[in-house]
Amino acid sequence: MNEEEPQIPQIPSAKSEILAFVWETIKVVVVSLAIILPIRYYLVQPFFVKGASMEPNFEDGDYLLVNEISYRFSVPERGDVIVFRYPLDPSQFFIKRIIGLPDETIEVKNNMVTIYNKDKPDGFVLNENYLASEQKTLGGPVIKLDDNEYFVLGDNRLQSSDSRRWGPVNRSLVTGKAFLRPWPITKIIKIPSIVY
């Protein structure tokens, strides 16, 4: 009768454990980067609000997520909060609200924004219920937009450098639409679409 010798478990060496750990870590990092990088560079981009131009809706230091893909399949709409490259210095990013659409004429006068387009050639006054009650919209020149331009304003009109000062934003400069404010935690919101 043959007795089998008991198997003595092999204890992995410290070197092989370290190599296994390093290999697993490399795999996790590579897979994570393969998922995160396309999202970060083609779908969603983080953006920190700087300055007071969008108060009280968005304050200095708010962290927003910007949807970069939706405008590849649809066009920006009036009321969208967008992030774009500043027309006078494309290395800077600004955040503003779209007020005027391509081929429209915008007139800012008497604390009102009047929009003239093919559907309303006599114009209509924009109802801006997202503005603070004490907000004042100072005028600027009447601006006629080309077929790829947008007129943008900050929600804090008295503290905003916007299309009244430096003109319209070309569609090619628009990065995307702000859709979520995840920070600060006490003010987490999905940024609503404005219906006029």
Image (tube, rainbow, N blue to C red):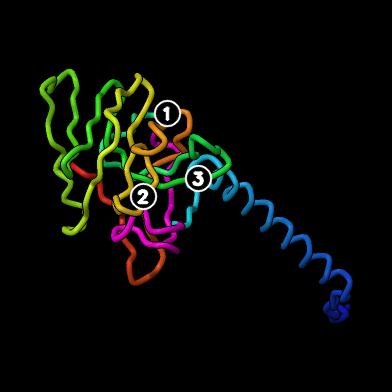
Q: Nearer the viewer, mark 1 or mark 2?
A: 2
**If the image is split into quadrants, where does the N terminus sit?**
bottom right
Mark 2 against mark 3, which lies toward the viewer?
A: 2
Main SS category, magenta section? loop
Disc 3 is placed on an element classified as strand
Kindly identify the residue that appears in the image at 69 percent across and 52 percent down. 30
Precedes in sequence: disc 1 or disc 2: 2
In this orientation, does residue 1 appear?
Answer: no
Residue 53 horizontal side relative to residue 88, left or right: left
Let me know if residue 114 is in the magenta part: no
The residue pinned by badge 3 equals 93
**Residue at the disc numbered 2:** 160
* Disc 1 crowd, CA 10 A, few/some/many (<14, 14-19, 20+): some
- Please rate how many residues cluster around mark 2, counting C-alpha atoms within 10 Å: few if below 14, some from 14 to 19, many from 20: some
Q: In this view, does 98 lie above or below 20?
A: above
Label 1's element? helix
Which residue is tagged 1?
171
Q: Position of residue 168 (x, y in %)?
A: 38, 31
Residue at 38% in and 23% down: 148
**Relative image position of residue 191 (x, y in whole percent):** 30, 52
Q: Which of marks 2 and 3 is nearer the N terminus?
A: 3
Identity, as a three-letter code, of the amino acid under mark 3:
Phe
What amino acid is at disc 1?
Arg
134 to 97, vertically: above or below: below
**First along the sequence among labels 3 and 1:** 3
Provide the residue span drawn in magenta.
50-72
Label 1 and label 2: CA atoms lie apart by 20 Å
Label 3: few (<14), some or many (≥20) within 10 Å? Answer: some
